Image: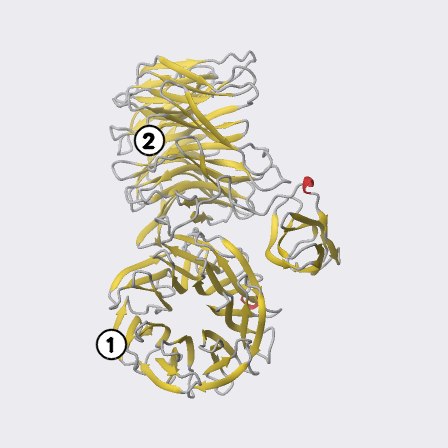
Amino acid sequence: MKKLYLLLAAFLAFSLLYGQSQHWYYNYNNGNMDEEAADIVYGDDGFIYVAGHETDEIDYDILVIKLNKAGEQQWAYLYEGEESGGAQTNEIAMGPDGNIYVCGSTANAADKDKFMVLSLDPQGILRWDFIFDESGDYYSYANSIAFGPDGTVYAAGEADYNFFVVAINPADGTEKWNFWFDGSCPAAFCDDVAKTICTGSDGTVYAAGYTRASESVQMVISALSPDGDEQWRYTHPSLNVGNSQATNIIQGADGRIYASCFVTEDMGVICLNTAGEKQWIRTVDGPGPEPYYGEYAYEVLYGIDNYVYVVGRTGGRDDIVDTDLDVTVIKIGLDGEVDWFYRYEGFYGDYDIGFQIVQTADTNLHIAAYTCGLLAEANLITLHHKTGRNLGIVRYLGPEISMDVAYALDKDENGMIYLTGYDYEASDGRDLYVWKIDPPRNTDGYYSLQDYQSSGVGESIIETPDTCYVIAGRQGTTSSYVTYGMRLVKTDINGDTLWKRYIGGADEDGAYNVILCPDNGFLVSGYTKSYGSGGKDVFIVKTNELGEVEWEKVYGFESDEEAFSAALAPDGGYLVGATSTHKSVAGDIWLLKLNAAGDTLWTRWYGGEKRDEVNEVYPTVDDNFIIVGSIGHAEGIGYITNVYVMKLDQSGDTLWTREFGTHDYFDTGEDILVNDDGTYLLAGYHHWRNWLAKLDANGDTLWTHSYGDDHAIGFTSIARKTDGNFVMTNGRNNVSMLCVATVDPDGNMVTADTVQWSPEINYAASQAEGYDVCANAFGGYMVTGKGKPSGENIGTWNIILYRKGGILTPLPTLGIDEFPVFTAANNSLPLDVYPNPFSNSTTFQLESTEPGLAEMQITDLTGRVIYKMEAVRLQKGRNQISWSADTLPDGIYFCRVQSGNKVYTAKIIHLQ
């Protein structure tokens, strides 16, 4: 007997603060049963409806849930068919009458799945359920639903292995008509299936899927009148084509019909006119070998920008493992030409799929995806529609960090995204979830600039003459904080890494500041424990424009010394601002004047008995120097300091000093901007507030402003934008989000951006802190700092880059330019390895006929890349590359070095 339940199940909804709005994560858990979502729709009534199934030890039941925009459950409805039979969902939609429609299947008394559509009213009450030929002794399924201009419900699927479409009266669920056909395949059980359905502006019904005229599967699209008469049928040729299938169908704003498809295992799109005549078909083959599971297109979208987008999966870069699949999105013009081709491989992912795609009013694209490799996780991918550039990837890792999937998504009128699927909890199995997310807007984007297994932070960022960006900071070789190395990274406006440099020795090293030199190289300031006199010593590194070290110098004593800033001097040398405990245990300001080769010309000490610090050093318009930091006073709870500014001449003699504070707070000056008229903008932390002051050329105060709530972190950096306004980052606020403020020349607030870290938003709220900001040439800004993937006590900090504004560059037409795939046809050259086998480290040796840059990667036997070193400079002749593999499991691995069109390979064995 059929049982109908209206459930008030317990659910979890908690807030995730992201952007300047409050968001939530909803979890449905009805005890020790599995619940999965299949589809989601944002209704015209402003509510979210999600459909899926719940399974117990006996059968599957259809589950429909209604949520409001605050994530509060309104009702949960359970539809159970036969007691021991199954019921499953494929799609959910809101009809033009405001009612909810779900299609799928339910088992009959003979345990045969039957084609089913059910309708609920907005209160979750069953209006009717339509089951086609309920007693029939064959299987049938409803795969897709659509609505006619008069409200008629159309459902497409299969019945008794036939392509099947039915029209249903929305008022009472009675059948108006049905249409079916059977292909001419002579073999038994050759199925014909309608997988998708839509209606045209004139009421024509378009159903698509596949048919079998032979053993091969052929794509088929059928056009039906509102009365069920077939107008035409398009069948894709099978001769010399192989299998083909349509998976999703829509009518574009141009009136033509578009269907996502795959043809001979390649994903693509076909375009027909309303007479059923093919206009074009465009398929794209992934760069990897044909995967075992095949390439596939899941959904097609006609964009508001009058382009067609298709999402699915294609073969990845792996030339060894044929299970490697990548999330794929293709942008196609109305002429059928590919505009760009995007692929995403998850974290060590080799089975990555994009299921659904939507476009928000800002024209960005959002994809519900699943990636599986080292971790199985749900993803929301946001792409810039013009260029295909990745603006952010939300990675969902459920509480068990196990199997988590995103199957579907929808958007609301405010551009918010609702993502659904299931997460896995070991004690309770799979749980249905819905997650409300504010995605990146316009061209704003977040990027992680390191792998996820080591901790790091970006401390300084500058724009280079080629409109790229160099970030200095530190990164660990593992997740430990005691193994930091100095890090230098160059990226383009898209957030793509151009090169990375690790600088330092075997102990801890780090960078706090980077400046551009007259030769377009870089001067990096920081500290080292690998070299020097003991403790931390000032570490200054000069590189060329590729980040390759030209010279490095260490300055210090047996105490701790760290360089926080450096400025280019008028004589071509540098003034370095450091803090030292050599003369005072608390710490003093220590300035070093260096020549262009890094030799010391003079040093000066500034400070008293309490801790004094320098944060930034800059040249002034009159060829002197301005220094900002803090000066210590009586110790209470921690250090009591005031904001401190001093102006020095080229010999280090003090011209004037200024102090701001009341000797009872921890106040500090973090950054200072030199204006063309000789005035200064001083940013920092004052009386528990974000603080900005303008000083005249003599250091006298013109005005001050305080911003934000008490207990704010304080501004850490300030930069001048191209529009004359000023942008500041304050690390984070009291909700652990990156915060950036823009003010006008008088210090009045223009905008305040509060942004959570989007590449790694997980089950627990992530954290982000911005340490430095620079204006970009496109009117926006770039921020570097650190981001933590999943909450205060989970994961490690990563170096991050956040971009607001900027003109992105398009992806190549056929995919991202990546490390070339090696095959035997490349005729690899020998790569000598010693020792081999090895335990901790080994050295690769190769002979190069000319100088140039080379890339190296290590793969395991499955072809998974476990290590990648970029932009190693080779000299003509014999070259050596050393590699340390302390944490590598024992086994056989492959090394590949690429330089120009030459490939060097070797098999290596690691034995502890």
567 or 692, nearer to the observer: 567
Q: Which residue position holds label 2?
A: 93
- Report if the CB atoms under discs 1 and 2 are less than 8 Å apart: no
Q: Is residue 294 visible?
A: yes
Answer above or below: position of 129 versus 698: above
687 or 684, nearer to the observer: 684
533 or 131, nearer to the observer: 533
Measured in 3D between alpha carbons, the distance from the residue under mark 1 to the one under mark 2, in whole angstroms, is 61 Å
The reply, left or right, for residue 786 in relation to residue 704 is: right
The reply, left or right, for residue 519 in relation to residue 852 is: left
Residue 90, disc: none
Answer above or below: position of 867 versus 151: below
Percent coordinates x, y for residue 259 in the rendering: 42, 27
Q: What residue lies at 52% left-to-right and 83% top-to-bottom?
A: 601
808 or 290, nearer to the observer: 808
* Disc nearest the viewer among 1 and 2: 1
Q: Quadrant of the C terminus?
A: bottom right
Answer above or below: position of 147 versus 232: below
Percent coordinates x, y for residue 402 in the rendering: 51, 46
Q: Residues within 10 Å of mark 2 (few under 14, many from 20)?
A: many
Q: Which residue position holds label 1?
A: 702
Q: What residue lies at 61% left-to-right and 43% top-to-bottom?
A: 821
The type of residue carrying mark 1 is: Leu
Q: Residues within 10 Å of mark 1 (few under 14, many from 20)?
A: few
Where is residue 351, by image quadrant?
top right
The type of residue carrying mark 2 is: Ala
Q: What residue lies at 32% left-to-right and 72% top-to-bottom?
A: 675
The reply, left or right, for residue 811 in relation to residue 255 is: right
Helix, strand or loop status at disc 2: strand
